[in-house]
């Protein structure tokens, strides 16, 4: 029950959520709601693990995971962008499809044994900073460090670059973007693909770093859905997504650790003596997701913030404008 | 009618055909634009003007026909391709991203800046361009903070920044107040003076004769007059070319003594969706057997006013009294049950349920009461009969009453909505923009129905941006500006004099009536 | 899209896609759905082959193991029963565009509620079937309704995205039931409760084998009747009642509903509760008719998710749901023995994807145009 260790592990497991949430931020900023994150993460986790077994190189595993999850996301992209179908139902279908394919192709992987994982290391100097050093820069996976870089990059990309400007325009007012020669369809395909790749990276982060292995659907255990919820809480902002992700990661770790000691805050630790109470602890991340959504939604109402205006609606070109 | 030796043309469109499922929008249309001219494209709603220009601007692709720019054949696969050829269009509904700044909107879709935005640099560039054409606007402002007129300027800047030589303006005056219209005309003249050419889409005759050098008239997708010099043609002739017959606004409005006050609105204050004040103390009343108009440029609180009256929006202060009952800040149902009818501005998003049948749509306000309701069940037989009666009585063109209303034309859908509202025999009706987007025949039908309501003694509040419509139907007109009533005028005849229109125009741009009268008396005195 | 031409302009023909301006012919939706399912089975077969299985053997097995004789047909119907109820639950929520994907959790809570009647016990163990069954039905529906109320209330009052909240409640429901079967009602330390007394079982066909010999060994239970009754009632609610009219109106255009004076907040909560109650009834039917005890794995078997697909495939029509549920019951029943074990789930996913995609054909007309059209 060392808070430093909980936060350190929280940052690591929060990285899973962070990748998935950043990917979803990008997809939703372009106007496409992709509820298939859970499915894309599963297929990412499965392919990362199985490719790493086959090749012995976790880097190849990560890259393949990203590519495969990106590929799966294109099913959703085709259905909602080209065929203009309902994004909610298609996203659900994608989750089912991703889970099903992962189960079929991942058959037997759970007994496959151990693989070489993504490398862990500490950052010189930065790891010496009191409190922050051990939490953020000591013996973390290379993927965690990638997460640190990706968050500000994503923010800068969205808010301060030309492609980011186009991305926002496509999600807010696709007809305007189209009129200026921005290819709305291609942009949306691209960002859904990017979102899929990041969800796949999140999945790979589980199976090759945070909780190595393949445990069928339990591998993700609903983290894809939590990531979708975090995006709403984050108001489509990468930094808020990062804060939320790490907090959730810490919560997951806290739940594990809180059952360890016999004494908690000077009192008899009920969670140690009655392990069945652990079932209630297991509810916490999910309950917190709902609470976070309540907070996020109330804030959105108060500040009159909103989702990208075109989120969830297909862009139909050449409608009669009268 | 053109000169013997035609000057070099900047745009030539020949034999353009564009069909939409069920509609032939452009039927072998020819169009020519000379450099340095303002060329009006005149026609009714649905005549195919916007379609033709959307083809030229690269938004639609023609089914047949060719386009030449400066003599060479072009094929625009996208609006970007059109802009690269120097053709830019300012749409009727602005194509601006509300959450982005003016500069960001202007830079959208351009190759420069390559990657990093360097906004300060570009802000300055855009401010300078604005000065050159007399288009003043703050480059750092977010679009949603701008007035409609300013947004139009951003649209123009966007095209000028891209080096457009041909500017297509789709009904640019529809959203402007009379004074702003003069400003726009000055800008257009300035642009022509600097070598640009302008295509001016409109259905308003007086504007066309005021600004355009030449005019091409479209009727039902066909050209009825090609490149006629505006000075050589009378308005009557143009009107005939436009609608195919002499337009006689024969509105049969009998004089009528209004009864007691049915609707009384007192000092209404409310906010818009963004949380900014939209109504700042509106007071007005409507009597039985009276049509009262609310004039104003779009976005001055008309929408919010109708919503507060109908119970769809809460107000912060003030009261709406209907037949002596307070109806504001209760639910919509209360108003419905107390004799209120509401013809909303947005037929498809508010007024109807597109995928439900005509029957389901007409019982919207009747399903709670017998004979359509039987306890907690619905009598679908009675509902169908009711729908069939309305289909007959209101001349709704639809194969069966089970057809989903999304398949109906705008005019038919409006008839469904009016049939539903009127069949409730309301004491009071608020109608917002009831004729927007309808063709002439449908407009006349709507006008007749509104007048019939006046005949039977209902009170009607007509909120419209069409001044002619207001003047010909209303007994009195209030003018609203920035959420305040600027004044009220009586309409004595259906052919109101010019000074009345001028007064209304001044009020629409923010001069209160007392001030106009004071200045008037000063001028006369 | 509507105006896109898929081939170059100068080709002798091109494909033109245009929106339908009239209603599609009556046979088209059914034909398109069947086509989508066939396409899905082909795609699924390819994936099975890719994973090292034999698609023909798999499909032949599914057909034989689910419709081969009366016994397996009865088992198919047993599998279809919970799906009917979860699909009905989804259909009424979807009708109002409330994306309740928590039928799974509501189903589990319904099973828990019905079990609590026996295990708590709320009704004495020696009571008759006539007391047990109605109380279990009420308890199951009530717990499901509670589990639907939470996201409904949050949606109505705080505009909380119901997709996420219902999904999160699924996980919470599983932990909740786990707690009870591990800690409170465990039978000798196993992860399940003791078996219910016979009086708490829903009657099965096999019980009547004495009078109707054909019923010998048939497992079909009274839950099917609950499902069919619920479907009929729901049909009347949707198409013939004032409430159903309000639900359809809100679902199609909430602005129009508000304009018609309909209280959306209240309806959101009520519809989510009805949806939850239907799923809860499904959970009750499953513990009372099949499992006969509270146990997590057979209860949390994904019926809630299959219900989503079935509701969609049936175009939200309660009566069609019965038919489609039987098909999916067959898939699940036969799928238990298919290797690899993920196949049924994958095929469900593919079917749903193909179905959603096929909707395009109902909204658009695809024409082949010869030459330049003038």
Image (tube, grey):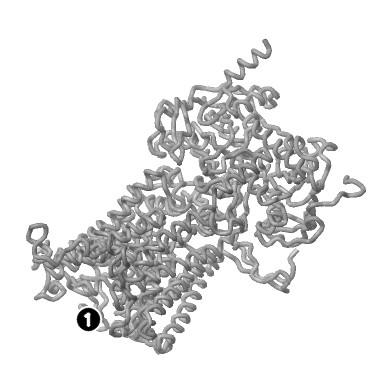
Q: Quadrant of the N terminus of chain B?
A: top right
Q: Quadrant of residue A195?
A: bottom left
| Figure check: B403 above or below A80 | above
The answer, for residue C199, to whether it is visible in the render is yes
Viewer-proximal residue, B272 or B185? B185
Q: Is residue C19 above or below residue C77?
A: above
Rendered location of residue C15, percent (x, y): 65, 70
- Does residue C58 appear to the left or right of B19 in the view shown? left
- Residue B81 placement: quadrant: bottom right
Please tell me which residue lies in front, B157 or C123. B157
Q: Chain of mark 1?
A: C
Q: Nearer the viewer, residue A250 or A217?
A: A250
Quadrant for the C terminus of chain B in the image: top right
* Residue at the image position 73 percent from the left and 42 percent from the top: B191
Query: Farthest residue toward the top?
Result: B525
Residue furthest toward the right? Answer: B4
Residue B133: image location, x then y, percent: 68, 40
């Amino acid at each position: 029950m060392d808070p430093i260790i909980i936060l350190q592990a929280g940052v690591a497991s929060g990285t899973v959520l962070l990748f998935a949430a950043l990917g979803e931020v990008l997809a939703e900023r372009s106007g496409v709601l992709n509820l298939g994150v859970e499915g894309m993460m599963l297929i990412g986790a499965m392919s990362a693990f199985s490719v790493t077994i086959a090749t012995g190189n976790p880097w190849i595993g990560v890259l393949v995971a990203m590519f495969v999850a990106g590929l799966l996301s294109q099913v959703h992209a085709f259905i909602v962008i080209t065929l203009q179908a309902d994004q909610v139902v298609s996203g659900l279908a994608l989750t089912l499809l991703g889970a099903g394919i992962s189960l079929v192709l991942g058959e037997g992987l759970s007994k496959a044994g151990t693989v070489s994982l993504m490398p862990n290391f500490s950052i010189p100097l930065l790891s010496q900073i009191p409190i922050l050093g051990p939490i953020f820069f000591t013996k973390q996976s290379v993927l965690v460090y990638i997460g640190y870089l990706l968050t500000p990059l994503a923010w800068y990309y969205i808010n301060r670059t030309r492609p980011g400007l186009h991305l926002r325009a496509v999600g807010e007012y696709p007809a305007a973007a189209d009129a200026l020669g921005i290819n709305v369809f291609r942009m949306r395909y691209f960002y859904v693909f990017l979102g899929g790749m990041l969800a796949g990276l999140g999945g790979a982060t589980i199976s090759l770093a945070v909780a190595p292995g393949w445990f069928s659907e339990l591998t993700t255990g609903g983290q894809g859905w939590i990531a979708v919820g975090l995006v709403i809480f984050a108001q489509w902002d990468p930094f808020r997504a990062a804060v939320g992700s790490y907090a959730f990661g810490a919560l997951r770790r806290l739940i594990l650790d809180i059952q360890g000691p016999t004494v908690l805050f000077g009192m008899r630790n009920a969670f140690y003596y009655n392990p069945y109470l652990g079932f209630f602890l297991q509810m916490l991340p999910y309950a917190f997701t709902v609470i976070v959504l309540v907070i996020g939604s109330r804030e959105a109402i108060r500040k009159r913030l909103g989702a990208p205006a075109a989120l969830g609606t297909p862009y139909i070109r050449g409608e009669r404008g009268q | 009618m053109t000169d013997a030796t035609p000057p070099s043309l900047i745009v030539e469109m020949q034999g353009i055909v564009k069909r939409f499922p069920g509609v032939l929008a452009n039927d072998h249309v020819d169009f020519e634009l000379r450099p340095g001219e303002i060329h009006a494209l005149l026609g009714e709603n649905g005549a195919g003007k916007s379609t033709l220009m959307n083809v030229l601007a690269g938004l639609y692709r023609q089914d047949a026909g060719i386009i030449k720019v400066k003599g060479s054949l072009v094929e625009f696969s996208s609006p970007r391709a059109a802009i690269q050829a120097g053709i830019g269009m300012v749409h009727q509904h602005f194509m601006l991203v509300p959450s982005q700044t003016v500069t960001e909107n202007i830079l959208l879709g351009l190759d420069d800046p390559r990657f990093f935005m360097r906004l300060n640099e570009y802000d300055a560039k855009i401010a300078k361009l604005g000065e050159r054409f007399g288009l003043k606007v703050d480059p750092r402002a977010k679009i949603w903070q701008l007035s409609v007129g300013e947004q139009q300027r951003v649209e123009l800047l966007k095209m000028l920044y891209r080096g457009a030589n041909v500017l297509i303006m789709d009904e640019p005056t529809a959203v402007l107040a009379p004074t702003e219209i003069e400003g726009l005309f000055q800008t257009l003249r300035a642009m022509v003076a600097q070598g640009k050419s302008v295509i001016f889409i409109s259905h308003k005759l007086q504007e066309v004769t005021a600004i355009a050098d030449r005019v091409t008239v479209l009727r039902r997708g066909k050209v009825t007059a090609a490149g006629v010099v505006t000075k050589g043609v009378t308005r009557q002739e143009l009107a005939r070319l436009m609608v195919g017959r002499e337009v006689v606004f024969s509105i049969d409005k009998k004089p009528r003594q209004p009864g007691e006050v049915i609707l009384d609105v007192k000092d209404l204050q409310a906010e818009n969706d963004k949380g900014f004040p939209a109504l700042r103390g509106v007071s007005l009343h409507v009597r039985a057997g009276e049509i009262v108009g609310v004039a104003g440029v779009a976005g001055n609180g008309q929408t919010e006013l109708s919503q507060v009256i109908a119970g769809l929006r809460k107000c912060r202060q003030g009261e709406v009294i209907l037949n002596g009952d307070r109806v504001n800040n209760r639910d919509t149902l209360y108003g419905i049950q107390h004799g209120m009818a509401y013809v909303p501005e947005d037929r498809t998003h508010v007024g109807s349920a597109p995928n439900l049948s005509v029957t389901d749509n007409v019982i919207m306000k009747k399903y709670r009461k017998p004979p359509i309701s039987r306890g907690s069940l619905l009598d679908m037989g009675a509902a169908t009969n009711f729908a069939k009666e309305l289909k007959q009585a209101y001349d709704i063109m639809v194969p069966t009453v089970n057809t989903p209303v999304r398949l109906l034309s705008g005019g038919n859908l409006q008839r469904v909505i009016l049939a539903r509202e009127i069949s409730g025999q309301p004491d009071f009706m608020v109608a917002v923009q009831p004729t927007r987007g309808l063709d002439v025949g449908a407009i006349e039908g709507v006008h007749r129905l509104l007048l019939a309501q006046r005949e039977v003694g209902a009170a009607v509040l007509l909120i419209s941006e069409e001044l002619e419509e207001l003047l010909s139907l209303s007994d009195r007109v209030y003018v609203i500006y920035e959420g305040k009533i600027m004044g009220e005028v009586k309409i004595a005849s259906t052919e109101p004099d010019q000074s009345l229109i001028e007064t209304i125009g001044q009020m629409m741009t923010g001069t209160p009536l007392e001030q106009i009268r004071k200045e008037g008396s000063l001028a006369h005195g | 899209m509507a105006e896109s031409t898929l081939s170059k302009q100068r080709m002798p023909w091109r494909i033109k896609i245009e929106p339908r301006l009239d209603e599609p012919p009556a046979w088209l939706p059914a034909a398109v759905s069947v086509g989508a399912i066939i396409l899905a089975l082909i795609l699924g077969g390819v994936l099975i082959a890719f994973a090292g299985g034999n698609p023909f053997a798999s499909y032949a097995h599914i057909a034989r193991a689910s419709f081969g004789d009366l016994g397996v047909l009865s088992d198919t119907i047993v599998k279809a029963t919970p799906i009917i109820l979860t699909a009905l639950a989804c259909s009424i929520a979807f009708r109002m565009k409330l994306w309740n994907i928590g039928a799974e959790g509501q189903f589990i809570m319904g099973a828990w509620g019905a079990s609590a009647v026996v295990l708590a016990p709320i009704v004495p163990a020696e009571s008759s079937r006539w007391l047990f069954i109605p109380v279990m039905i009420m308890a199951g529906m009530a717990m499901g309704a509670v589990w639907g109320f939470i996201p409904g209330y949050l949606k109505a009052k705080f505009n909380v995205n119901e997709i996420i909240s219902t999904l999160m409640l699924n996980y919470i429901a599983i932990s909740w039931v786990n707690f009870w079967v591990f800690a409170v009602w465990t039978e000798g330390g196993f992860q399940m409760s003791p078996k219910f007394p016979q009086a708490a079982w829903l009657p099965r066909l096999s019980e009547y084998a004495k009078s109707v010999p054909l019923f010998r060994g048939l497992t079909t239970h009274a839950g099917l009747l609950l499902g069919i009754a619920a479907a009929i009632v729901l049909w009347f609610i949707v198409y013939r009642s004032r409430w159903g009219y309000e639900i359809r109106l809100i679902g199609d255009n909430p602005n129009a509903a508000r304009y018609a004076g309909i209280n959306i907040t209240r309806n959101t909560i009520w519809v989510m509760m009805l949806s939850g109650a239907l799923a809860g009834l499904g959970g009750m039917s499953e513990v009372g008719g099949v499992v006969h005890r509270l146990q997590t794995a057979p209860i949390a078997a994904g019926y809630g998710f299959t219900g989503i697909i079935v509701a969609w495939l049936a175009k939200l029509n309660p009566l069609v749901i019965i038919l489609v549920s039987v098909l999916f019951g067959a898939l699940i029943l036969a799928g238990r023995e298919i290797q690899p074990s993920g196949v049924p789930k994958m095929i469900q996913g593919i079917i749903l994807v193909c179905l959603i995609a096929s909707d395009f054909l109902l909204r658009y007309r695809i024409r082949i145009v010869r030459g330049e059209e003038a």
